[in-house]
Amino acid sequence: LIVKLTKKQSEVKKKDLTLDMFQPSRYKPNDLDQMAEDTKFSKREVRCLYRAFKQECPNGIVDEESFRDIYEKIFPLGDAGQYAHLVFSAIDNERTGGITFGDFMEFLSVICKGTTHDKILWAFKFYDVDKNGFISKDEMVKVSDSIHELMGVNGTTPKSGSKTVKHIEQVFDTMDLNSDGKITIEEFIIYCTSNQEVYESMTFLTKQKVV
């Protein structure tokens, strides 16, 4: 009888282990109070954001599909797929395929609490789609297209489309100070800090409340 029970317990244990392998790993962030200090959010803000994050992602990690679904709810009239992919890739620094609450808070910290310089660096990372340290003209067009799709601007005529591309080319050529066909981080910073409209857009979110 003891042998039978032991064998049965062993089978149950193996079954439980097998089920665990197929369950998403649960992520628990480090001390939330320490996170508040690191990200410049108040303890109340961090706790509110964590509750909201857990509601959307009970296991504590957002995969790209779930991230896209969130954007589709915010922008129901457009196609959020490409834009969500680009933002997800920029946040997922370690290329794990998942965004933890810590990753999310680092992103919000830069966008909402960071200096203008911090925001410019993040914007460069966002435009540098292939992560090679430069922004190409194709990457700039790709990001621009994703924004138009997100906002539902998908029925443009060839003429208006060519105007958009021409505008992007003009901006790119202005940024590309040495005309080598790629934008360095230094060139990107110079453009963003010398262009009043861009600079003001970078400082806008600093004045906004998150929760």
Image (cartoon, grey):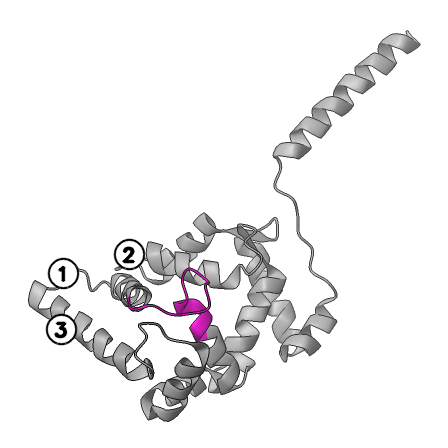
Front in this rendered view, residue 61 or 198: 198
Measuring 55% from the left and 52% from the top, which residue is drawn there? 98
52 left or right, relative to 31: left
Question: For the residue carrying disc 1, how many other residues have a C-alpha within 10 Å: few (<14), some (14-19), or many (20+)?
Answer: few
Which of the two discs, 2 and 3, labels the residue nearer the N terminus? 2
**Residue drawn at the location 87% of the way across and 15% of the way down:** 6
Bin the neighbour count of mark 2 within 10 Å (Cα to Cα): few under 14, some 14-19, many 20 and up: many
Looking at the picture, tell me which residue is in the foreground, 89 or 8: 89
Q: Amino acid at mark 3?
A: Lys
Instruction: Give the residue displayed 32% in from the left and 89% down from the top.
Output: 197
The stretch of residues the image draws in magenta is 123-137
Q: Residue 74, percent across and down? A: 37, 62
Secondary structure beneath dot 2 equals loop
Q: Position of residue 206 (x, y in %)?
A: 49, 85
Amino acid of disc 2: Asp
Q: Residues within 10 Å of mark 3 (few under 14, many from 20)?
A: few
How many numbered tags mark residues here?
Answer: 3
Residue at the disc numbered 1: 155
What amino acid type is highlighted by mark number 1? Gly
Taking the spot 53% from the left edge, 59% from the top edge, the residue there is 92
- Residue at mark 2: 79
Viewer-nearest of discs 2 and 3? 3
Residue denoted by label 3: 163
Q: Position of residue 2 (x, y in %)?
A: 92, 10
Instruction: State left or right for residue 193 relative to residue 32.
Output: left
Contact between marks 1 and 2 (CB within 8 A): the answer is no
Occupied quadrant, residue 128: bottom left
83 or 73: nearer the viewer: 83
Please state, as top left, top right, bottom left or bottom right, where the N terminus lies in the image. top right
